[in-house]
Image (cartoon, coloured by chain):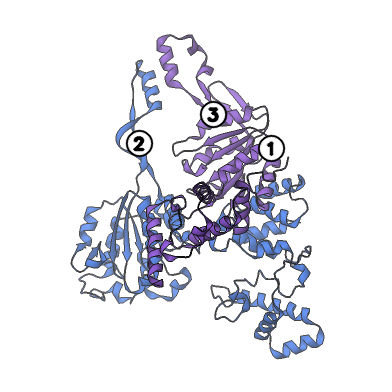
């Protein structure tokens, strides 16, 4: 009977496998769940979820699959005031429909219809349009509920304690693409570690010593350099103008990167990369550095990350003299290509959510210039960017 | 054998279910959570409550999976061979048992703690896959196979510094210890300081959760820090009034060193206190 649950989890994007399902069966047989819904929830959670960022997703799917199971009544239940539902019904059902239903049946049926309507709406509006919860139209949105998660129109008794546990969605802000704290970024950046033995030989190479001793017949000690992270990184930050709203997340990324990489250099630019970059924003009109010098200073094994929203007039990229601040002899496009030729490993992180990219021409151009290696500045985005850089 | 928390460890329901399931099926239990929420202590308490031995294996960045199984001390054998020692003839004299070997050959089911597995190299968990799954391994030097007499209860903790490979995760039960809610926290304090003044606890908890709310703290204080702080407060016999006073000039809580562990955080806190003072005068 849990096969369905298993497939829902899989469809929901949780990395579950048959191995875990068998473990669940085994655990059920051993009586670990004790025939209580709460215990079953905890048990399946500890088996199927292996990462706290997936807890929220699991809770939602669990709620969806086991919705309607009768739970033991509990007076702690979360009740939705009837008035809200009525209001909501007014919003999504026309007057005629309401009357029709009323003449046919009772409150429960209205709610049933409303629920169906909401589900339909939800499907039709997929693609990032958060129609519920915005504009304060829905009482659910305001209280942080998700329509999928709220058992609309159920009688009091059905909101058991167990529902409370998973419908509260306690782990909400841990989902992959939402929260970006420095710690999380650090973990994401750490994927870029590449260990190499470099520098002075300070460690005893035991295997090498044994090998050469056996080979030569006398004790022949071999030393090797210590292993350390050998990744070198160049960061280019877009500053000012449209980047101002994204300062916080950029700062977080910056501080995380600083503590993770020994070989790290950073430069600022405005909107698009041109012939000059700078290291101190307060003195950017006096103390700039020629981009050519940057290209000549840092060897090609550096990996490059651009951080910017790439939102500007297309002319700023494609035409000489297109820059909003100064006369640039060569277009931004030329500079981007020049950099791309030297540094094979480069990515662009964009703080603008990915679903909005296609509406901006300049983002499209930049993405093409980057050979599609543009990722959103979210945890999952950084993750895939690091994978790309490590390739 | 059921784990239900102990006299000095408060376990939430979901944690109990996870521990019991892992103990029943003898699968490894992976514990994650904020630092200081009692991940390592859990293993000790599970061992205590089951009345069995605890074998601890603390992982460092240089730890290799092989070290948990056994190590072959080639250097001392080489030295002995040059000195003509009799010991050299038996290779078994140069094999040092690791923690997993100890755990597998223990007479009674032990609890094996693999602490902070994420500290090690990225390949570390992969190297232990088979050993933890089948609870056996092969010693190449002597040709024997060590198989677990009693499958140990394995508890693994991780601070999330590195991602663990999927194949490894698939074999584990997982539990995320989330930060205790104020109610649970009171319970935890009761367990640790049974004689503490109720009002002191109330005030201290208020301050504690306030500090956790302060945006931008590098390291939020956690349960273990709170317990240390309370211990200090009790030792100093500070009257609760000191905590209660909402006088902005003394906004920094007494003995804050136990709660804020880093200079920047103390500075941040001082700055906020200073701003508050200016607001009131």
C-alpha distance separating marks 3 and 2: 24 Å
> Is the same chain shared between marks 3 and 2?
no
> What chain is tagged by disc 2?
A
Q: Which residue is mark 2?
A: A226
Q: Which residue is mark 3?
A: B98
Q: Is residue A218 left or right of residue A9?
A: left
Residue contact between numbered discs 1 and 3, judged by CB atoms under 8 Å: no
Position in image of residue A190 (x %, y %): 42, 50
Split into 4 quadrants, where in the image is the N terminus of chain A? bottom right
Sort mark 3 into few (<14), some (14-19) or many (20+) by Cα contacts within 10 Å: some
> Is the same chain shared between marks 1 and 3?
yes
Residue contact between numbered discs 1 and 2, judged by CB atoms under 8 Å: no
Of the two numbered discs 1 and 3 in the rendering, the one whose residue sits closer to the viewer: 1
Of the two numbered discs 1 and 2 in the rendering, the one whose residue sits closer to the viewer: 1
Query: Which tint is chain B?
Result: purple
For marks 1 and 3, the one nearer the N-term is 1
C-alpha distance separating marks 1 and 2: 43 Å
Q: Which residue is mark 1?
A: B50
Q: Is residue B47 left or right of residue A237?
A: right
Position in image of residue B125 (x %, y %): 53, 41
Residue B17 in view of the camera:
yes
User: In front: A356, or A182?
Assistant: A182
Sort mark 1 into few (<14), some (14-19) or many (20+) by Cα contacts within 10 Å: some
The count of marks equals: 3
SS of the residue under disc 3 = loop
């Amino acid at each position: 009977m849990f096969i369905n649950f298993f497939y829902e989890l899989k469809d929901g994007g949780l990395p579950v496998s048959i191995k875990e399902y068998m473990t669940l069966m085994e655990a059920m047989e051993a009586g670990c769940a004790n025939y209580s819904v709460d215990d079953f929830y905890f048990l399946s959670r500890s088996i199927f979820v292996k990462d706290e960022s997936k807890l929220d997703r699991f809770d939602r799917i669990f709620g969806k699959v086991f919705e309607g199971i009768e739970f033991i009544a509990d007076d702690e239940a979360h009740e939705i005031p009837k008035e809200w539902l009525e209001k909501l019904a007014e919003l999504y059902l026309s007057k005629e429909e309401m009357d029709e239903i009323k003449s046919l049946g009772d409150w429960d049926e209205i709610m049933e219809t409303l629920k169906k309507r909401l589900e339909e709406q939800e499907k039709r509006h997929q693609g990032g349009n958060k129609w519920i919860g915005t504009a304060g139209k829905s009482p659910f949105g305001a209280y942080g509920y998700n329509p999928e998660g709220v058992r609309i129109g159920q009688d009091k008794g059905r909101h058991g304690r167990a529902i409370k546990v998973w419908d509260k969605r306690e782990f909400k802000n841990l989902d992959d693409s939402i929260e970006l704290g420095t710690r999380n970024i650090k973990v994401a950046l750490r994927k870029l570690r590449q260990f190499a033995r470099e520098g002075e030989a300070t460690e005893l190479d035991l295997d090498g010593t044994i090998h050469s001793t056996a080979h030569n017949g006398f004790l022949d000690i071999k030393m090797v350099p210590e292993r350390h992270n050998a990744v070198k990184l160049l960061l280019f930050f877009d500053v000012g103008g449209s980047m101002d709203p994204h300062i916080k997340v950029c700062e977080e990324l910056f501080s995380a990167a600083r503590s993770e990489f020994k070989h790290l250099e950073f430069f600022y630019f405005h909107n698009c990369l041109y012939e000059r970059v700078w290291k101190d924003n307060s003195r950017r009109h006096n103390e700039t550095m020629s981009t050519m010098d940057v290209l000549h200073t840092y060897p090609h094994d550096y990996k490059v990350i651009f951080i910017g929203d790439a939102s500007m007039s297309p002319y700023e990229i494609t035409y000489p003299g297109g820059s909003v601040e100064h006369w640039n002899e060569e277009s931004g496009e030329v500079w981007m290509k020049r950099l791309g030729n030297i540094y094979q490993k480069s990515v662009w992180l964009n703080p603008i959510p990915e679903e909005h990219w296609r509406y901006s021409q300049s983002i499209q151009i930049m993405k093409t210039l980057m050979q599609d290696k543009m990722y959103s500045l979210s945890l999952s985005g950084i993750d895939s960017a690091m994978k790309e850089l490590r390739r | 054998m059921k784990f239900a928390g102990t006299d000095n460890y408060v376990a939430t329901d979901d944690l109990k279910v996870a521990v019991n399931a892992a103990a029943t099926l003898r699968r490894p239990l992976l514990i994650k959570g904020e630092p200081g929420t009692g991940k390592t202590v859990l293993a000790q308490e599970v061992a205590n409550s089951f009345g069995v031995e605890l074998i601890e294996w603390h992982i460092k960045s240089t730890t290799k999976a092989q070290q948990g199984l056994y190590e072959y001390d080639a250097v001392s054998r080489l030295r002995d061979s040059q000195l003509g020692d009799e010991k050299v003839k038996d290779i078994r004299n140069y094999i040092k048992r690791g923690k997993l070997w100890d755990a597998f050959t223990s007479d009674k089911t032990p609890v094996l703690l693999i602490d902070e597995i994420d500290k090690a190299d990225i390949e570390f968990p992969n190297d232990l896959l088979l050993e933890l799954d089948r609870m056996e391994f092969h010693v190449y030097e002597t040709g024997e196979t060590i198989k677990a007499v009693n499958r140990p209860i394995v508890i693994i903790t991780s601070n999330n510094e590195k991602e663990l490979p999927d194949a490894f995760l698939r074999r584990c039960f997982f539990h995320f210890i989330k930060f205790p809610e104020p109610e649970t926290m009171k319970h935890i304090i009761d367990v640790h300081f049974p004689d503490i003044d109720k009002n002191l606890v109330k005030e201290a908890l208020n301050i504690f959760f306030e500090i956790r709310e302060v945006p931008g703290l590098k390291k939020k204080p956690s349960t273990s820090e709170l317990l240390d702080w309370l211990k200090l407060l009790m030792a100093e016999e500070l009257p609760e009034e000191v905590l209660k006073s909402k006088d902005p000039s003394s906004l920094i809580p007494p003995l804050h060193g136990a709660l804020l562990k880093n200079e920047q955080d103390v500075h941040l806190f001082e700055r906020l206190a200073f701003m508050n003072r200016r607001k009131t005068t």
